[in-house]
Image: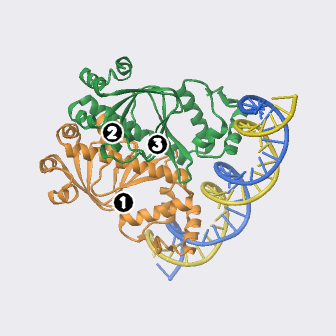
Chain colours: A green, B orange, C yellow, D blue
Amino acid sequence: MIKELKASYGDLFEAELIKEIVQVGTFKEVPAGFKLMDIGDYIRGMPLLVLGVIKVLREDKEGDELLLYYLEKGETCSMSMTCCMGQTKSEVRAIAETDAKLIMIPIRKMEEWTAKYKSWRNFVFESYHNRLNEMLLTIDSIAFDKMDERLLQYLKEKARVNNNDVIHNTHKEIAYELHSSRVVISRLLKKLENLGIIELHRNYIRIINI
Amino acid sequence: MIKELKASYGDLFEAELIKEIVQVGTFKEVPAGFKLMDIGDYIRGMPLLVLGVIKVLREDKEGDELLLYYLEKGETCSMSMTCCMGQTKSEVRAIAETDAKLIMIPIRKMEEWTAKYKSWRNFVFESYHNRLNEMLLTIDSIAFDKMDERLLQYLKEKARVNNNDVIHNTHKEIAYELHSSRVVISRLLKKLENLGIIELHRNYIRIINI
DNA sequence: ATTCTTCTGTAACTTTTGTTACTGAATTAG
DNA sequence: CTAATTCAGTAACAAAAGTTACAGAAGAAT
């Protein structure tokens, strides 16, 4: 645990804070697809992501989803932070996009560390800042872009976080995360293929040319 | 200044913090329509809103806007907080929706107070929490609702923050804040009027029935 | 091997949203 | 008062997105 922690957060946190994290944090390893948190859940602790990618989703009244953003190594779920401080329920769903390793920090430590460690304060504020900016980009994409552009961004981003030009998803799954319909996505994907940007296969898509 | 401050923040902050705010804060009064901050601006300080309403907007590549949310009495701009701590530029535009009074806090005090005052920490975290939740609602609305529903929500919210069932805006202005077109908004407004929900006039709209 | 299920492609159609164009009414500027 | 401008209503059309329906291919289950 110390090794992973130092690799992801060593430059960020002072040595003493790292020591405290090791003392009170619990290590957790989850497989891709694991649901880390659901809408309405009370948050038990704050996660520090040391390996892998977590996707954060929002749900509509019908129970359909929309991908909000990905959390990567060295990041945390800002939603969790305020939720556990105020003891409110989660407004989002978090699912491991890849196999992931995280360290769970007990709620009570957060308040304490915020007063005690400057590096923790900076980390917390930076997390909020990053999250708000991610949300702005999400809004930009939904409000300003047409579906073809959103789809392309989605594929690029997915390839990036998975570090793989092959995207293992069905059209249906992609439609779901973009809150669209399978037929629309198939149509647009075919267009992208005709433009030479991607290559379509059953159950996977290969990105050819940005 | 002390009176307004106590009215909006008296229950929130301990007496000593209030005293410090009075010492270092500068009082600012702006008329409706005043641009408090623009995209790309460096943030000089953190605003505490003591009276009035501020609208926060996002801009697309063509320079058209989208209303994100309103800030009300007792709130602050979370965007400002991290921006001024990290010295990054603003990603949003802030315009006084009504005449407004605010107290500007110098950047350097923020770090200090975060370590020193528990009430300040709570306020800062709560602000972030509220802002993230507002952003989620904005995303819900854009991603999940049709324009007629968004328009209705817009009118309701606008009436609420202005505490007035008469909305003094042209169709063009409404279209702009919803990132739509004037003709579309006129069409949908007429539908709402036919349903007996609103009453249309030149330069203003009256809300009749929720 | 045969059946069943899932995935993709496509056509045909509807709904929603956006665009262009024009009108007359209300308001403002000169 | 007259001319110019702004605002709202509407029609006609175009583009984007969503829906329904169906078919064939791939793969899984039996």
Mark 2 or 3: in front is 3
Q: Quadrant of the N terminus of chain A?
A: top left
Q: Residue at x 23, y 48 (%)?
A: B104
Residue at the farthest top position: A3
- Say what amino acid the circle numbered 1 marks: Glu
The answer to whether residue A69 of the structure is visible from this angle is: yes
Q: Which residue is mark 3?
A: A38
Q: Secondary structure at mark 1?
A: loop
Q: Secondary structure at mark 2?
A: helix
The answer to whether residue A197 of the structure is visible from this angle is: no
Residue nearest the viewer, comparing B101 with A151: A151
Expressed as whole percent of the image width and height from the top left, the position of residue B26 reads 19, 50
Expressed as whole percent of the image width and height from the top left, the position of residue B72 reads 32, 57
Q: Which residue is mark 2?
A: B83
Q: Which residue is mark 1?
A: B97
Point out the tag, 2 or 1, that comes first from the N-terminus.
2
Q: Which mark is residue A133?
A: none
Q: Is D30 drawn above or below residue B160 in the view shown? A: above
- Say what amino acid the circle numbered 2 marks: Cys
Q: Quadrant of the C terminus of chain A?
A: top right
Expressed as whole percent of the image width and height from the top left, the position of residue A112 reads 23, 35
- Write down the quadrant of residue A166 in the picture: top right
